[in-house]
Every structure is written in structure tokens, then in C-alpha cells.
Image (tube, grey):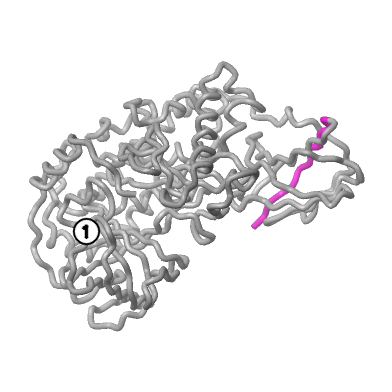
Amino acid sequence: MKNTFTFVFIVCSFLLNTLDVLSQPVTLTSSNLPIIVINTNNNAAIVNDPKVGAHMGIISNTNGINKITDAFNDYDGAIGIELHGNSTQNFSKKPYTLETRDATGNNLDVSLIGMPAENDWILLASYIDRTFIRDALAHYISESTGEWTSHTRYCELIVNGSYMGVYILIEKIKRTKNRLNISKLATLDNTGENLTGGYIYEVTGFSGGVGDFDQHRVINYPKEDEVTAEQLNYIRNYDNDFRNVIFSPSYTDVDNGYEKYINVNSFVDELITQEAMRNSDAYGWSAYFHKDRNNNLDAGPVWDFDQSSGNSTYKNGASASGWIFTDNDGYIPLFWSRLWSDARFKYRVKLKWEELRTYKLSTASINRYIDSCALLLNQAQARNFSQWPILGVYLWRETAGFQTRDTYQKEVNYLKAYMATRMAWIDNELNKVAIVPLSTDNLIAGAQHVKLYPNPATDYLVIDTGEENTNIEKIQIYSNTGVLVQNVSFTSAGNGIMKINLNSRLGNGLYHLKLVSSTNKWYNVNFVIIK
């Protein structure tokens, strides 16, 4: 979608251009990173829209030594390419969106630098993040929570013969089996359960156009030129129902409150990633949501972290304290603060945070991740900052002390120190959160003769109630902490036996299966997932 821009944004864009610096030409001969070479057809300029035709070659040798004279061995073919982003387009080092194509110009799914095959990709310039690490770190944190998140790969880029510097090749958020694996929605899916998913939409200040369905919500999938009026109305009404319920007096009711509409774990994970990074753009600018067929609303995937972790004065971004979701600036949906006012939700955040801090998000683990990225980038960053001499130079929304961070290592050290302080602040705040019982007492134990197999399960379960006329009307799966994680679509063989498919997002662990019959007879059976 090409967004509409306000006068203020246009003025800010002009100021960004005036604060940019002139590049110092660099000739790239070799790199320990993959080298991407793009040449547009007839040397055409790359514009915001439409994509122009080009050839792309990628050199990525298994020994990690890539020379510009080597053959293109990772990709060697056609692409379409255009500028990416909003404010970041106005810097000299441009971000790009590209699609891989076959010889006839059609989309071509390919694996790039070891990432799953697809045709839509983004090259992030990471211009204002002088470490090049913040986006990758955020996706590492999100992946640690168990959510799907875009894969990233560092590379060096040459466009039309000019060295452009260090870039991050990243998977574009997209509905596909190799990315966000939710149901495909066709233009004829306008009624019944088919209408319930899947959907992807974004909450963004850069809203506008056909796909804008108010309150800064913009449809991402189906595409705005493909989504039907019925589909747009469905996802708008579903999200509106959630927003209305969460501001009702009974919003914490387990069965009829907000948990009826959202997969709570995903909202916990979104909050943890955004707040760990203290992302100035969190919740209101590049905030994605998705809804699978016959399932509740999920928060995520996460996106856009160049103004996080002390790298922007926006929303007091230099401070390592304070919750971003409380900054209700007209763009952040108010339901985030409302969720936080629920003691059970807050306690779930505490439990998940403490679990992650024991290893995956320990300060030592975060430092190791940052150091590993910095070591990988050590040679390439020197070339990048020779091409773009911006260390210690004012660009945009710089935080105090930027002048003294005049080397790459100083920027890395600043990031590490900020993250340690930020994580410690969250530790302290969540230590204050009261314990709230998250039992499954609301699940009434049923007959012991209900059998599940295979158990442990991987991707499906067969349920045998042992009764021919069970008349099961509802099946739900709860986590071991009592969180509803899946409303199950199912078919019955008519003899008390049903097969259900498990949501691919469910990780290893103990779960509770709840079955409700037409006579309000409840069954509660435990099972384990091991993948």
C-alpha cells in the first residue's frame, strides 16, 4: 500500500534530506557477508512505485569468503524492485522492496541465503541504527517467545555499480506456508466459516486508501485491491467487537470477556518483545495483527525496530524506564493499557518474562547475541561507514551523547548497556506484580473414558469419547496456565470419534482439551505436544 502523507510528514521528510550526509564512494572487492548485486534494466531509477525490472545476483559461498568476481551462486535472475518504507526513504541510503521473478515476469518462489522459498523480500538499509543489530535482535527476542517472526540475513549491497553498504535482507510479512501460515482467503469466501480467516492487518499512523478500515487499521492480507467488502467488514467488526468488550465492565470474564476474541499468549509475546526493545514505534506505527480461520485474533508478527533501544528521542526513547504502551498518543490502541489493567494478563506477562529471562533473554544471552552480530559485521561496517560517514553525526532524533559514539564499537557498547538497563527495569517492575491463580477450575472434569491419540501429539489429535451420541458442539484447547489458545474446527464421524488439527503455533508442553456437548456436558482431558 502507498500511504497518504500529512503536511507535517512532508516537512519532516524535507528536514531529513537536509540533515543527510554525502557518501564517500567505496569499491567492494570481497566480504565475509553475502554480496548482493542489483542492476536495473536500462539503468532505470528505483522509485517508490511501481517496481522496476532488474537483475539480481547473490554471491554466498559456504566458506564465508565472497569475492565480487565470484559467480552468482545463490540467486542469478530477474527481480522487480521499488523503494521501501516511509520516512527512511528520504535518506541517501535507501531501503528496498523486491520480488523474485521468472523469465516471463511472474513471481518466482526461491530460497535466498538459506531462508525458506518465497518471492517477496525487503532490503533494510538500517541507516539510523548504526549497529545494524536492533531489528535482528528484536526478531531474536520474538522468536524466543515462540512466535513466528521474519528471518534476517546480513549482506553487502551494490546497486547499478554503486556500493550501498551493509543491508539486512528480511522476509516480508506475508500469508504463506513458509511464513505466516494462516488460511488462504479467496474472493469467493464471503460467508460462513470461510469468511473468518485468514487476515493480516496493520495499525499504522500512515493509514489511508482503499484498505484503510478506520482507527489507523489497514488491511495487509487479502491485498487492498483483492479484499471484498464482506471480508473487510468482517475483520473490522471482529476487531471492533474485541475493542468494545475490553472496555465493558465484564471484560475480564473468562468466557465472555476479551479472551473470547484474542489469543492471549500472542498479546503477551508482542508486549514482551516491544517493551524489551522499548520500541518508540511500538503498537501504533508498524503493529501487525492476524486472524486464522475459526480462530481468535493474534498480535504480531513484530516489525520495525530502528528507533528502539535508546536510538530515538521519540516518546522519550532515550530512557530505559517506562512502558511504551501507556503513551496514548492517539495512535497506540487503548486496549493495550486496558489489558494491563487486568491482573491475570499482567501476571501472564510476568510468568512468561521470568521464564525467558532464565536463559533465552538473560543479559548474558542478549550480550552474546549482540556481540555475535558485531563480530560478523566487523569488516563490513568499516566499509559502510566509509561510504556513509555518519558515526557521531546528527541525522534524526539523536539521543544525548551521540557525538561521542564516533566508532562502531561505541555504538555496540551503548546498545548493550541500554538493553541491560532496560531488562533490569522490567525485572523490577514485574517483581511487583501480584500472583494471580491461573487455574483451569472453569474446566469441569468429565468422564474418564475419553481417549486421545496419539498422545503425545504433534499436529493432530483423534478424540474418542466412547459414546456414540456425544453431540459435541465446541472444542477448545487451553494452555497449562489456563489460557485459551485454540478454538478447534472439527468434524465428527458420528460414533463419538473426532479428528482435530492442532494449531501449528502451539509449542511443546502440557495442554487441556475441553469438549462441550449440546446438553452442556463438559469433558476435560490433558494431552502433551512434542515436536
Please report the bounds of the magenta region as a residue range: 520-531
In the figure, 339 relative to 274: above or below? above
Q: Residue 281 placed where, x, y %?
A: 32, 38
Viewer can see residue 501: yes
The main secondary structure of the magenta stretch is: strand
Nearest to the observer: residue 80 or residue 179:
80
Q: Secondary structure at mark 1?
A: loop
Which residue is pictured at 45% across the width and 47% down the height? Answer: 301
Q: Residues within 10 Å of mark 1 (few under 14, many from 20)?
A: some
Residue 401, quarter of the rendered image:
top left
The amino acid type, in three-letter code, at marker 1 is: Val
Residue 63 can be seen in this image: no
In this rendering, position of residue 30 left or right of residue 168: left
Question: Disc 1 marks which residue?
Answer: 47
* Residue 406 is a magenta residue: no
The answer to which of 325 and 33 lies nearer the viewer is: 325
Tell me where residue 431 appears, x and y as whole percent: 48, 27
Report whether 38 appears left or right of 395.
right
In the rendered image, the quadrant that contains the C terminus is: bottom right
**Is 127 positioned to the left or the right of 262 in the image?**
left
Is residue 60 placed above or below 461 in the rendered structure? below
Q: Position of residue 381 (x, y in %)?
A: 21, 61
Q: Residue at x 39, y 75 (%)?
A: 102
In the picture as drawn, the residue positioned furthest to the top comes out as 249
Q: Residue at image x 70%, y 40%?
A: 476
